[in-house]
Amino acid sequence: GAVVSQHPSWVICKSGTSVKIECRSLDFQATTMFWYRQFPKQSLMLMATSNEGSKATYEQGVEKDKFLINHASLTLSTLTVTSAHPEDSSFYICSARDASGHDYYEQYFGPGTRLTVT
Amino acid sequence: QKEVEQDPGPLSVPEGAIVSLNCTYSNSAFQYFMWYRQYSRKGPELLMYTYSSGNKEDGRFTAQVDKSSKYISLFIRDSQPSDSATYLCAMSENSWGKLQFGAGTQVVVTP
């Protein structure tokens, strides 16, 4: 089955620093990747959609200068939280879509990255 | 009003019982309906997928979609403690579009 990995799984950083989270599709090429954030006991909120080789499309209310997304290859997308603050502490989850297969609707989710900003 | 409404629970059932979950939605353009299972601190995994209205069965899981009522359901038969998780409904207008998730229902199956 399609596997998506995220690294790191958990990161603690100080307020004002930047953190980079990686999302990789391990056994398929992901033309589209999605980034979500999830607060405790709440649902996934889509932050942005990224297509390989082009700029990400951000959802309304998401600061593109704060959450930098790069989808430089068909197997790797990165989310950089710049100048992180405690309110950015959350669970960040990526998903990837394999457009080459028949199940093109399906998004395969990574295991998530827990960010804690102190 | 949220586009997708889902009761967050928790829903506690004894082992062997039928778990009944549902979501309502307001966007009549939704055509693709999915149920995901999420264990604590893990990413969601797809359980069931349905296009348009109708029923779909896969093992112990049955998904139903009633577009006329804008209502979808997931039933889990012969529930097991390992079914304890949060179940999220999700839907989209087209196969390549973004998913709109419900809040998720926490299910606890007690031995």
Image (spheres, coloured by chain):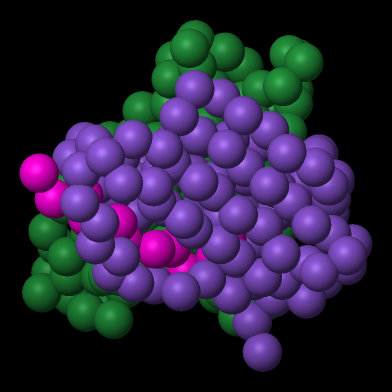
Chain colours: A green, B purple
**Left or right: A112 in relation to B72:** left
Identity of the residue drawn at 43% across and 20% down: A3
All told, the count of numbered labels is 0
In magenta stretch: residue B106: yes
Nearer-the-camera pick, A107 or A55: A107
Q: Which residues are magenta?
A: B101-111
Identity of the residue drawn at 68% across and 47% down: B64
Query: Residue A105 at x, y = what percent?
Result: 73, 33
Q: Is residue A47 visible in this depiction of the protein? A: no
In magenta stretch: residue A113: no
User: Does B106 appear above or below A99?
Assistant: below
Identity of the residue drawn at 66% across and 89% down: B1
Identify the image quadrant of the C terminus of chain A. Answer: bottom left
User: Does A104 appear above or below A91?
Assistant: above
**Left or right: A112 in relation to B62:** left
Name, please, the residue furthest toward the front.
B17
Query: Residue B28 at x, y = what percent?
Result: 88, 67
Query: Residue A97 at x, y = what percent?
Result: 64, 30
Identity of the residue drawn at 20% across and 51% down: B14
**Left or right: A36 in relation to B73:** left
